[in-house]
Image (tube, rainbow, N blue to C red):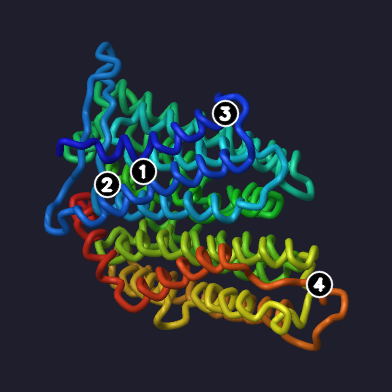
Amino acid sequence: MDFNYLSAIIFLPLLGAALIAFVPGLNRKTIRGIALVAALASFALAVAVFALFDRHLLGMQFEEMYSWIPVINANYHLGVDGLSMPLMALTSFLGLVVVLISWKEENRVREYFAWLLLLEASILGVFCSLDLLLFFIFWEIEVIPMYFLISIWGAGRKEYSSIKYVIYTLFGSAFMLAGILAVYFTTGNLNMVELTQNGIAAGAIPAAAMFFLLLIGFAIKLPVFPLHTWLPDAHTDAPTAGSVMLAGALIKMGGYGIIRIVVSFFPDIAKQYSVWMIALAVIGIVYGAAVTLRQTDLKRMIAYSSVSHMGMVLLGVFALGEVSMTGASLQMVSHGLLTGLLFAMAGFTMHSTHERDLRKLGGLARQMPVTAVVFSIAGLGSLGLPLTSGFVAEFITFTGSFSSGAFEGIKIFVIISVIGVVLAAGYILWMLQRVFYGPPQPQFDHAHDADALEKVYMFAFVILIILVGVYPAFLTDIMKMGIAPLIK
């Protein structure tokens, strides 16, 4: 491959961020234009990679490898396979969408768009990295822009939430770095592809210790119960664009890392502890859904639903079957689309009504008919309505986990976890009824519906959600090629 697609996809947003941050005298229109061009160019190249991707080839494609730090055998090594490529494409799509969502931002515009583009670049780097050191550096970079986006442009207890996010992330990163160093000291290798193929022989450091050091870092990001408490605060107090990137792409780094590194490096340890991880997954699914039912804040309700849906990802991963892992991968993409749209709709509704308390909202379908329809589609997708991405992702995850045979009694765990889907129907329908139906309220007469720009990204989300729901094979065929080499 002559053209370095992946480097361009990662560094175009980075270049946009640098131009916005360091070129003096830019006005707001120019800053927005640079952000849009950078995000659009990155997305266009991601679409090109998706189109050119060989759906019949196992292993990495679009690889780039250059010697970086020879003394420790670290390389600038990028590549995508059927697992990482859909997540990379999703991130580039969300990166473009959040620029459009932020088009009317007026507060410290230069800094805002620079941090937003840096956040996108760092997440893209995580999904494309094949060197453990490079992977960790991209992983750490995202903490900085996310902290500033929440603490400056957020709402509510934004300083508390941003600091809590940083503390949790750095706590997990410390364990992850220890795990990466342990792997390097044991093998002398940082190449993620070779480590997956060759396995990690037991050395001075027990394999189980490396497994758990790495797992803790990824489990916090996913987030796995009981390490999830940073998520509702960060989601609730982040600006709309921050919530969309956080829910849509950033927490997927956790699920991706568990599959790509934890399970594929240590398949025997993963099998040994699968019953405990699936127990945590089931608790997360049911607990997350139950707590969601208790929420009265619109954004906090959607945030807690993410805890439940990410529990389904953990269930599919540690069922350790090809079908269940494919379902978990599809669930990550589906959740990115559905919850990204839910947060975009929640943000738009809040900006239009200046209200987020579900007890005070109501009757908005008359003032905001387009918003009501799109919000309803996103909500119905999240509860698993057929012909939406949510249904097919959950169906494949549950059926794959049920038949995986990872351990005796897994079927009971899967049956219990389906309670989360029943509760999801309750909280989604209750939320839609409280926000949009009932008698119109005079205090919201000023509320306005989506304009042309907002309809563009709303309908883009809806098209992708329906496309994945109607024809999931265009993603699952790719994902299976990425998952197959990781199943030992």
Q: Tell me which residue sits at (28%, 24%) in the image.
A: 186
Mark 4, Cα crowd under 10 Å, few <14 / some 14-19 / many 20+, is: few
Q: Which residue is mark 3?
A: 21
Residue at x 27%, y 11% (from the top left corner): 71
**Label 3: element kind:** helix
Q: Are marks 3 and 1 in contact (CB under 8 Å)?
A: no
Point 33% across, 55% down: residue = 86
Label disc, if present, on residue 268 of the rendered structure: 2
The residue that label 1 is drawn on is 127
In the picture shown, does residue 116 fall above or below 339? above
Left or right? Give the position of 256 relative to 175: left
| Identity, as a three-letter code, of the amino acid under mark 3 | Ala
View extreme (bottom): residue: 439
Q: Earlier in the sequence, mark 3 or mark 1?
A: 3
Q: CA distance from mark 4 to mark 2?
A: 60 Å
| Circle nearer the N terminus (2, 3) | 3
Local packing at callout 3 (Cα closer than 10 Å; few below 14, some 14-19, many 20+) is some
